[in-house]
Image (spheres, helix red, strand yellow):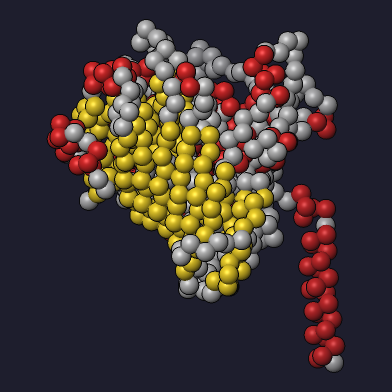
Amino acid sequence: MLHKLFSASLLLAFTGFVSAQDSPRYGRDKFRQLDQELPTPNEQRTASGAPGHAYWQMKADYDIHVEITEPKASEGVLPKLTGRETITYHNQSPDKLDYLWLQLDQNIFEPGSDANMTRTGTIGDSISIDQVAKWVKPFDGGYKITSVTDASGGKLKYTINKTMMRIDLPRPLAPGATFAFKVEWWNWLNDRMKWGGRGGYEYFEEEDNYIYTIAQFYPRMAAYMDYSGWMHKQFLGSGEFTLDFGDYTLSITAPSDHIVAATGEWANASAVLTSAQQKRLAQARTSDKPVMIVTPQEALENEKERSNGTKTWVYKSKNVRDVAFASSRKFIWDAMNQPVKTNNVLCMSYYPKEGNPLWEQYSTKVVAHTIKTYSKYTCDYIYPVAISVHTDRIGMEYPMICFNGGRPEKDGTYSERTKYGMIGVITHEVGHNFFPMIINSDERQWTWMDEGLNTFVQYLTEQEWDRDYPSWRGKPRNIVDYMKGDPNAAPDKVKARIEPIMTNSESITQFGNNAYGKPCTALNILRETVMGRELFDHAFKTYCERWKFKHPTPADFFRSMEDASGVDLDWFWRGWFYTTDHVDIELANLRYKRMDPAIRCSPRS
């Protein structure tokens, strides 16, 4: 009898559980938990949102040598980059690997790349000759791989699949083992103003001069993750990069009159800098305001003539996920110190005369302010330098260096919009040193985890720069029109061009609003209204400290914020991140009443 009663109770409990899951109310419940949406906690990623005791990640070390070949306009050829590298890959996973995957990001410029084959556009009433030329003869800027060998020079079998390359190992790479191999390549450099791209060059026709901002320039290891294996989705342009950390030596050979900026610290400063530049640099290391290393007058002299010789600049960096560099004879260069606890960060800017007077006034000061403010809200900046490089119409980030727009008119005048736009983009791109260069999320899959979180801290940083700063994103009123959708569309199409934040980066329709604006606004509301600053700031900093120099996922962020604050936020993540819902509150009836001061209440008896 007891057995039958227990069986009946169990059946009723199970039936109740199933009916609750299947009930119409369950699917409509805005406050149900996220348990079914989030991955099951394990030894690598705990239910608290912290890395587990068995957490692991890979490591890849690089020794890279590249050379820029800079033509004159009369030669009729493009600038060229030639490179060779030795990669030492550390298998720190519990898995045996039969092959390795590398990213060939520059192959996005191959005519047959997925990015080119899936690109869409419209043709208006007229079309320019340049547009026709780009279709008839697209830019062929992909890698020309000339050699792939092991450390002893033996050939390795490899297969190129568009923006990815698989190297078949001669024997499986066991857990805890390392494998070193070499790659040699070359590629034409792209004119960013014509072909776009995150790196490339800008050409100044009047002087026959170039500014090179070189990124994604070397074949680099794809990340291998505990939750997904190899991260080898094709690079289409929107979804950026998922990379592991490592140590780098980067040697750049450029024309001898060029100034070169790069990720890392100089390993041969005495060989490439003049004695005057070295003295100024030493002064800047202890200065609380910018010191000129290359003055505007010196840069102007460099522009006038070209050197026939070359010079090699060597940079070293530790525990970074990538490297990039910039090179030009046009660069003015200034620097100042920004302390972050015991670390002195050399904040620097490199810019041509076309950036002045705006850049000389603001750039390096904004870099220093950003490093200081982000370190307060997230985690301490531990790298030795932070660099802002001037370009036209671009903002792109890499460890310790970023490329930023904001160019005055030719007569040196500029609008308030240009000034604040430049300050904003420098803040944003320098801020990317924290998201995702230190707190290393998967950009290829979840753009919002670096762009959204970064835009949120950018908003805080802008407001600390100037309490009246006209921040473009962050204030709730700025996201209202996007979240409402298209009021002129049919009822079932109002939100047809809106996706949840939790959408793959390549499937987002309105990229800026979805990945930048909406998550930034959500966190601002969470801080100012739902949680309060004290709880929010502690939880947010806990997440950043837990996952610095590691690979967090959305679940790690959601769980960490709840774990460190003691606030159940599942309803908030569901509404803001998993749906396209908007706050639907209406003031249906508003009445205005005014008390007549002539009417007096009689005193109580």
Left or right: where does residue 335 sit relative to residue 414?
left
Left or right: where does residue 320 sit relative to residue 587?
left
| Residue 46 makes an appearance in the image | no
Residue 20 lies, in percent from the top left, at 79, 62
Q: Name the image quarter holding residue 170.
A: bottom right
Q: Residue at x 31, y 19 (%)?
A: 305
Residue 217 lies, in percent from the top left, at 49, 42
Quadrant location of the N terminus? Answer: bottom right
User: Which one is in front, 104 or 69?
Assistant: 69
Q: Name the image quarter holding residue 364.
A: top left
The answer to whether 480 is drawn above or below residue 9 in the figure is above
Label tally: 0
Q: Which residue is drawn at 45% across and 49% down?
A: 84
The answer to whether 538 is drawn above or below residue 276 in the figure is below
User: Which one is in front, 427 or 63?
Assistant: 63
Q: Name the image quarter holding residue 478.
A: top right
| Residue 140 makes an appearance in the image | yes
Q: Which residue is drawn at 32% across and 50% down?
A: 316
Q: Which residue is drawn at 42% across and 24% down?
A: 210
Given the current orientation, which residue lies at the most extreme bottom position?
Answer: 1
Left or right: where does residue 276 sit relative to residue 511?
left
Residue 567 lies, in percent from the top left, at 52, 54
Residue 357 lies, in percent from the top left, at 31, 16
Given the current orientation, which residue lies at the most extreme top position?
Answer: 411
